[in-house]
Amino acid sequence: MVQKQKLYITGGRPLKGAVRVSGAKNAALAIMSAALLASEPVHLENCPNITDVKVLRDIIANLGVKVNCKNKNEIELLTPEVVKTTTPYKEVKKLRASNLLLGPLLARFGKAEIALPGGCNIGTRPMDLHIKGLQALGAKITLEHGFIKGTCGCLKGSKVYLDFPSVGATENIMMAAALAKGQTILGNVAKEPEIVDLANFLNGLGAKIRGAGTDVIKVEGVKQLGGGRYSVIPDRIEAGTFMVAAAATMGDLLIEHVISTHVEPLIAKLREANVEVVEEDDNIRVTARDTLKPIDIKTLPYPGFPTDMQSQIMAMLTAVKGTSVIVENVFENRLQVADEFKRMGAKIKVEGRTAIIQGVKKLQGAQVKASDLRAGAALIIAGLIAEGDTEICNAHYIDRGYENIESKLTSVGANIRSC
């Protein structure tokens, strides 16, 4: 996969037609990591063909897992009885989700040495909750020279309460508990759809997990997990990005292959902004016919408004008459994209974790720079509604989470190209 460096957009065209959503990035990464727990082949369908999936695929292949790409969206994984248990920094610096290998390696092989991970610079994402949870199951973990080093004999079930409903910590502890002896009770856990998808995948292999999607997850450990075939859920953030793009461009777009309950917070806010949203089975139609209205947003863990959609909704609000307010409660650096919007003529005042947006009549095309994955997607939306040409640098960030976004947008009327 060749990473693009720049995107060029000529704005002013409403999006019209239909676009299909790919598999969920965050679900696929967790499920691929969980495949290390399986003693038989695992066949994954609907995996997004994105950079993050490719990077994790390479990391686990270097551990000794047999990786067979059936096609661009299907992967078969077979983890032997003996693998490497160390992931060097050179491999993991590009991918935050590499930390999800910690729980599976400890649970099945009794040892793990994971370089502290990289990923997007969107704010503080400490590993302390992962470590405390795994220690509660009996693992011995130390931080040495930039590595998380863990060893254990037989993990034992325990009660674990998370100080914050961290998605990654919930996933890591749940995966480790699947092979621990006895019952593990996880309290104050994350409720994201990707957590439910991971639990469903593990249960399909023979795990005994109840309560995913609620505040408490209970795991009865089993001796081993088998194999199986599983299809990853649609990506709710990609779906949301297209929904906002349709609204921002005053378009009429049918977003196909989406679970509407996963994007309910966004649907509610778009309707509040005077956007017509119609749910049709596994499709959502977004139509903007009338003047959009300003709205206020507060990001929260699921089922609140997702932090991963905050930058995109800000892009839309820059050109909505009136004053909108966004409060970022999850990642403190999410608001840094506001400086790029200002280069396009937006009027935004950032105070701490709050952005006050005074809508302008029209954005102006400019050269801007993506600082992370979702900021890149937001700058695409800004470019679509801007007058003239927009050049987005660091476009490789966008490839981390969006499959063929240029071709998908081109198919519904956008003037966008990459190099």
Image: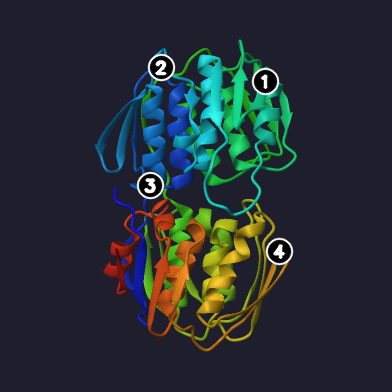
Answer above or below: position of 142 versus 303: above
- Residue at image mark 3: 51
Going from N to C along the chain, the mark reached first, 1 or 4, is 1
- Earlier in the chain: of badge 2 and badge 1, it is 2
Disc with the residue nearer the chain's start (3 vs 4): 3
Checking the image for residue 39, the label placed there is 2
Q: Which mark is residue 353?
A: 4
Q: Nearer the viewer, residue 2 or 54?
A: 2
Amino acid tagged 3: Thr
Question: Do tag 3 and tag 4 residues touch (Cβ < 8 Å)?
Answer: no
Q: Is any part of residue 168 visible from this angle?
A: yes
Report whether 331 appears left or right of 4: right
Q: Work out which residue is located at the far top of the displayed protein and give it.
A: 153
Q: Are marks 4 and 2 in contact (CB under 8 Å)?
A: no
Residue 168, position as x, y percentages in the image: 59, 39
Indicate which label's residue lies in the foreground, 4 or 2.
4
The Cα–Cα distance between marks 1 and 4, rounded to whole angstroms, is 36 Å
